[in-house]
Amino acid sequence: MAAATILIVDDDLDTLKLVGMMLERKGYEIIAAANGRKALELVAKSLPDLILLDIMMPEMDGYEVARRLRSNPKTEFIPIIMFTAKSQIDDRIEGLEAGADAYITKPTQPRELFAQVKAMLKRTPMRSAGPQVPAAEAGMVFGVLAAKGGVGTSTLAINLAIAMRQKTKESVILSDYRPGQGTVSLDLGSGNTDGMLRLLRGEEEITKRSLEGILLTHGSGIKTLLSSPDSVDAKYVTEVDKFLEITEQLRYLASHIVLDLGAALSPLASAVVHKCDHVVLCLEPSPNNVKQTRSLFQALVKEGVGEGRITSVLINRMRISIQLSWKQTEEQFEYPIATVFTPIPEMAYQASRTNTPLVLQDSTSLTSQQFQKLASILL
Ligand SMILES: Nc1ncnc2c1ncn2[C@@H]1O[C@H](COP(=O)(O)OP(=O)(O)O)[C@@H](O)[C@H]1O
Ligand SMILES: [Mg+2]
C-alpha cells in the first residue's frame, strides 16, 4: 500500500521542517509549500490525501486556499486540518466555514497532531488505505464505442474491464453511459441501477464521496456504475454535463475506467470521448459496417481525438464464410485493426443467460485470451 501523502502549507519554515520531519518518521509522504499559491499548484499536481494548512500567510491566506480547494470538484474531498496560531473562536468558525475539517492550535503537541492526522485519514479510506488506488494519480479512462448497436460493444466493455482487473490487480470501474439501454446491468445480473438514476436526476450530487457510496462491487472484483435498462430512462441521455462530471470523478476512484458509450456519436458520446484517454472502436466484418465505422473514425479524428488514441477491434459474431476476413476488413477500413474476436454465439448466449462474463467462464479459452490480449495492447 502506498503511503498517504500529506501537504503541509506554512510560511514559517521551522514549522514546515518540524512537522514535516515528525510525520515523515511516522511513514507519510510529505510535500510542502510556503505560501497559498504554491499550495494550490502542488495540490493540482499531486492530489495529496490530507492538507495541513496555516491560516496567516502573505499573499493568499489559508481561508482563501481552503475555499478554492472546496469549490473545485477535483479537490473538494481532500481533508483539511487548519494549523494555526490563531485561537479565537471567530477564527475557528471562519476556518470551518471556509472548508476546514478540523482545527489545531499552535503550538501543537506532536502527539495530538499525529492523532488528528491518523483519525482524519482513517475517515477517508478510499484515498489512504484504499485497496489499489494510488492516491495521487488519476486513472485512465477507456471509452468503448461502435457505429451501430449489436456489434458486441457492451460485451467487449464488460470483459475488457474484467481482463484489465485480472491483468493488473488494480482497481477497475465499469460504467455504461446508456440510460434507458443499460444492457450491461442485465448481462451482469446486477439489478441495481438506482445510483446512476439518482445522479442523473440530480437527487444526489456528483462528488467523489457520493460515487464511492454508489459504486457496486462485482464478483470479479471490478466496481460498477450501471445505467437503467428501462426505455423510459432514455430521457437522461440529455444530461451530458452530469455524465462529464461523473467521468471526471470516476477518474480518481480507480486506476482504470471502462465506459460503454454505445453506438454512434450522440451528443453524449461526442462530449465524453474528449474525457477519454483512449477510445476502443468496435466493428463487424460487413462492408456496410466497415464503411460506417470508417466515417466514425474520421469524425473522432476531426473532433480532436488523435489517431493514436483510437484502437479498432474486429468482432466476429457469426460463423459465416462470406464475411470479410481480418485483412479484407482492414483494407476497406483503411486503418489498422489491433485485434480480432472469434465468433462464439453459444458461449456469448450462455454468458448473458447465466450472468457470467466470458472471461470468467474459462480463463484459458481462446476468447479469454483475446480479451487479455486487448487489455495488454491498451495498458
Ligand atoms: N464474439 C461473439 N460471438 C458471438 N456473439 C457475440 C460475441 N460478442 C457478443 N456477442 C453477442 O452479440 C450480441 C450483441 O452484443 P452486445 O455486446 O450487447 O452488443 P452492443 O453493445 O454492440 O449492442 C449479444 O447477444 C452478445 O451475446
Ligand atoms: Mg450495448
Image (tube, grey):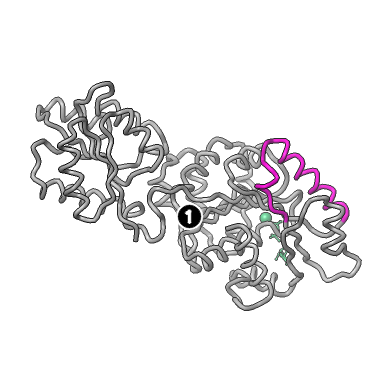
Residue type at the position of mark 1: Ser
Task: Please state the horizontal and vertical placement of residue 175, each as a whole percent of the image.
Answer: 55, 53
Q: Label 1 belongs to which residue?
A: 255
Q: Which residues are magenta?
A: 287-312
Near mark 1 (Cα within 10 A), the count class, few <14, some 14-19 or many ≥20, is many
Task: Please state the horizontal and vertical placement of residue 190, each as a whole percent of the image.
Answer: 53, 62
The image shows residue 128, relative to residue 327, as above or below, that is above
Please state if 20 lies on the left or on the right of 371 as rendered. Answer: left
Residue depicted at 50% across the width and 68% down the height: 220
Residue depicted at 38% across the width and 61% down the height: 131
37, 305: nearer the viewer: 37
Residue 103 painted magenta: no
72, 354: nearer the viewer: 72
Residue depicted at 11% across the width and 47% down the height: 110
Report the quarter where the C terminus lies: bottom right
Q: Quadrant of ligand 1?
A: bottom right
The image shows residue 54, relative to residue 355, as above or below, that is above
Q: Main secondary structure of the magenta part?
A: helix
